[in-house]
Amino acid sequence: MSILEALRLALDVLWANRLRSFLTILGNVVAVGSVVAVVAIIDGLNRYVSEQILSTGSHTFTITKFGFDTDYDSYLKMLRRRDLTLDDAAALSRQMRNALAVVPIVSRRETLKRGREEASGAVVVGVGEGVEELRTLDIVAGRHLTREDLQGRAAVAVIGEQVREKLFDPVDPIGQELRVGRHRLLVVGLLKPRGSVLGQSQDNVVLVPVTTYAKYYGMRDNLEINIRATSAETMAEAQEEAELLMKLRRGLNPWDEPDFNVFTSEMLYTLYQNLTKGIFGLTVGIVAISLLVGGIVIMNIMFVSVTERTREIGIRRAVGARRGHVLTQFLSEAVLLSLLGGLIGVILGSATAIVLHAATPLPATIRPWSIVIGLLLASSVGLFFGIYPAMRASRLVPVEALRYET
Amino acid sequence: MVDDGVLIELRGIWRIYRVGQEEVHALAGVDLEIRKNEFVAIMGPSGSGKSTLMNLIGCLDTPTSGSYHLNGRPVEGLADDELARIRNLEIGFVFQTFNLLPRADVLHNVDLPLVYAGVPRAERKIRAMRALEQVGLTEQWRRRPNELSGGQRQRVAIARALVTDPSLILADEPTGNLDSKTGEEILGVFDRIHRDGNSVILVTHDEGIARHAHRVIRILDGKIASDAPVPRSGGRDG
């Protein structure tokens, strides 16, 4: 009897008891489904986050007022810290030897207007000189902000694609005006579309000189100072240098705790990775438990099946089935059963990932390796928990099996 | 007639079961020789050891001591897989309760031994249909056992026994679950099989059925009590 025939036979039996078969494999469905879905979502997030966070540029770091490990007490403490200022940024820019660019950035949400058109929730970003060293900000029409704009606190703006669409379409925006509150800005440039991050459009944005921003809003919004080191090698030095200079500016001793925060995109990424590792660990736990429970259910059902079919086993043995044939038959059933569970799990897991991807900003990429691992896990469970019932079936004594009354 | 060499040779066969502390001597020193193309009835009351003898002859069981040659080859010391091979190729069983697979159709029930013999699918179908032809059931090949009458079921079982073209057809009370008319028909099938050159052993406790055979072996308390040819009462065997 070939493996193919054993499988066909197994399929017949499982189909004949389809409800029972289905209930038996739920554990595997859950286990494999979670593997595929969680891997898809975490992997999607990973790629996304690494692209987005790390696209802010390598060997850059940021000085901010607030850190991100905040319980309430440390939050109150940080609230009492001094604000960062444009002067801080200017001083660092002058004094640092290991910095390629020191760029103050500050932002807030505003509603933009032009005539009757409105773009709400737009991010107005005040940027300092050299911002294009930090972020990919390609201009598709007009020009970038210039040093003259900064020095003159010019009322000029570079707008994102979404702002153009909402306020200007179909007019060419360059040379047109838009209003932010009571201020008027002259559009001088248009940014290349950048898409969205976790559902947040990156194109609903207006860049203005940071000095202009300060003139309009003061510096109460949290200014951050972005610094790009001259190279990867000088990154650590640049961080120390910036920290020391900031402490001196604030009258702290070099050995004092800083009253500001320095973090790198790598730190952010590491934090994020630890988080996903946690989620992943949790998934591994769920999967392990589902597989264990699923496996025990399968073993149990296989025992029931062996008992129910004792007579059949006797008949098969009488007409010439060897122990190996009976073993193969029941093992095929167990493996096929849990493999089917795995397949349903793959389908449900993928569907979950796809639906989540479509319905929420969560990115998801279904990884073929997670499907392979899921199916391997499922069939190993079938093999492991199926072997004992199958061995018991194969060891039945033919004469007694034939006499068995159901 | 076909070659009539020795088919079965039993020498000093004992089969002892252990039930708790007690030993049950199901067979206590049986010597027996059956030649090819014989039609033999093994008779005895229940508990006489006739079923044990049938299981031993059918290689479903092995003797505690003694020697058993089937077709001149020793069988008593063979491994389980070897016994399975002999059951598969040399022996065709027919049981009182038919013992068909309820979920499988007639064709698959009949070709089951061929599956284990490793015969390819296409050839299996041809040979199974030929066996069904021998019992007159070709039209029902797609039916399931529960759609058939008792007599038809037993014919399917006989077809299954014939399909590997075995050396021996071994039937255990084959009419026990049938009414007398159907029983007669089934016995007629055995007569025909025998005339076609097969060796047939019938195990029964019914004298009327035993009369179909040409030789009756009576078992009592695990021993052969008598062994005699059946006087022919007419031209039945031509």
Image (cartoon, coloured by chain):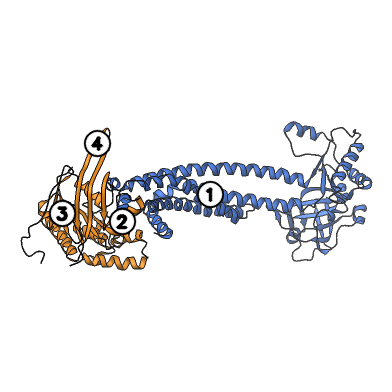
Chain colours: A blue, B orange
Read off the residue under disc 1.
A377
Vertical order, B129 against A27 (above or below)? below
* N-terminal label among 4 and 3: 4
Q: Residue furthest left?
A: B233
Amino acid found under the numbered disc labelled 2: Ile
Task: Give the spatial CA distance, label 4 vs label 2.
Answer: 29 Å
Q: Residue at x 45, y 42 (%)?
A: A296
* N-terminal label among 4 and 2: 4
Q: Residue furthest right?
A: A94
Mark 3 and mark 1 on one chain: no
Read off the residue under disc 3.
B41
The part of the image, by quadrant, that contains residue A366 is: bottom right
Of tags 4 and 1, which is closer to the observer? 4
Numbered mark located on residue B86 in the image: 2
Q: Position of residue A249 (x, y in %)?
A: 92, 38
Amino acid found under the numbered disc labelled 1: Leu
Numbered mark located on residue B23 in the image: 4
Mark 4 and mark 1 on one chain: no
Mark 1 surroundings within 10 Å by alpha-carbon count, few (fewer than 14), some (14 through 19), many (20 or more): many
Numbered mark located on residue A130 in the image: none
Q: In this view of the protein, which residue sits in the foreground, B113 or A93?
A: B113
Chain identifier of the residue bearing label 1 in the image? A
